[in-house]
Image: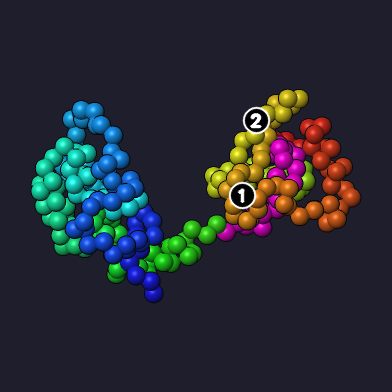
Amino acid sequence: MTDTTDMNAAHDDSGDDGTGDVGTGPGNLRDLPDLPDLPDLPDLRASLEAILLVADEPVPAVLLAQVLERPTGEVSALLRDTAAAYAAEGRGFDLREIAGGWRFYTREECAPVVERFISEGQEVRLTQAALETLSVVAYRQPVSRARVSAVRGVNCDGVMRTLTLRGLVEDAGTDPETGAILYRTTGYFLERLGLASLADLPDLAPFLPDSVEGVEDGADSGEVGS
């Protein structure tokens, strides 16, 4: 069982007790450019929450105060009150002062469900039909839905929509002759397969039946609807 999971990134406990200089990096006051006058902002707590939700490392209270043009003491007190309120309400996350700054973390009690989500919940499990369709796109891209359907012998419109929604396939323009939408695989497809480029795909030719090219020719001539 791992310890509490960081809401935004891996936990980074540098051992800093927050009493020294702010340090270098995104939270360094010396790196902060001159700030323009701020427009009307939401209340201070909402502003702090919005900043901390996008922070990729603990943010010092003094930096938050400078960005929001409020006294550091007021900001620090509100951060402590907000952290206490979250704990009292039993939220799924905590606001903690860590390594000289403030950041959101998931609650320790929620670690089991967070671990399950990370290890299982985000796994993309494709059906056999989806895997076959994705393979056709990968090896014949850019390719139209009609051609994919011809190779598989069934209508693939629904499967193509699923692959597009999952970020594995994307629009690659239109066929200049037929006007049909063409599809190709995405960078996410390469990432999921651990490939540097499409050139790393294994040679498929030895496994294809002799009739495949004839079926594809039929798709190009419009025998299969899009």
The x, y position of residue 188, in whole percent, is 58, 48
Closest to the observer: 7 or 183? 7
User: Given the image, on which type of amino acid does mark 1 rest?
Assistant: Phe
Closest to the observer: 209 or 122? 122
The x, y position of residue 60, in whole percent, is 23, 50
Inspect this view and state whether residue 191 appears. yes
Main SS of residues in magenta: helix
Q: Quadrant of residue 142?
A: top right
User: Given the image, on which type of amino acid does mark 2 rest?
Assistant: Gly
Q: Residue at x 72, y 52 (%)?
A: 200
Q: Quadrant of residue 124?
A: bottom right
Residue 189's tag is 1
Residue 109's tag is none
Indicate the secondary structure of the residue bearing disc 1: helix
Determine whether 34 is above or below 200 in the image: above
Which residue lies under the disc numbered 2? 173
Indicate the secondary structure of the residue bearing disc 2: strand
How many numbered callouts?
Answer: 2
Closest to the observer: 104 or 26? 26
Closest to the observer: 167 or 218? 167
Circle 2 crowding by C-alpha within 10 Å: few under 14, some 14–19, many from 20 = some
The x, y position of residue 42, in whole percent, is 19, 37
Q: Residue at x 16, y 52 (%)?
A: 79
* Mark 1 → mark 2, Cα distance in angstroms: 18 Å
Q: Which residues are magenta?
A: 125-147
- The reply, left or right, for residue 122 in relation to residue 149 is left
Q: List the single residue furthest toward the right.
A: 210
Circle 1 crowding by C-alpha within 10 Å: few under 14, some 14–19, many from 20 = many
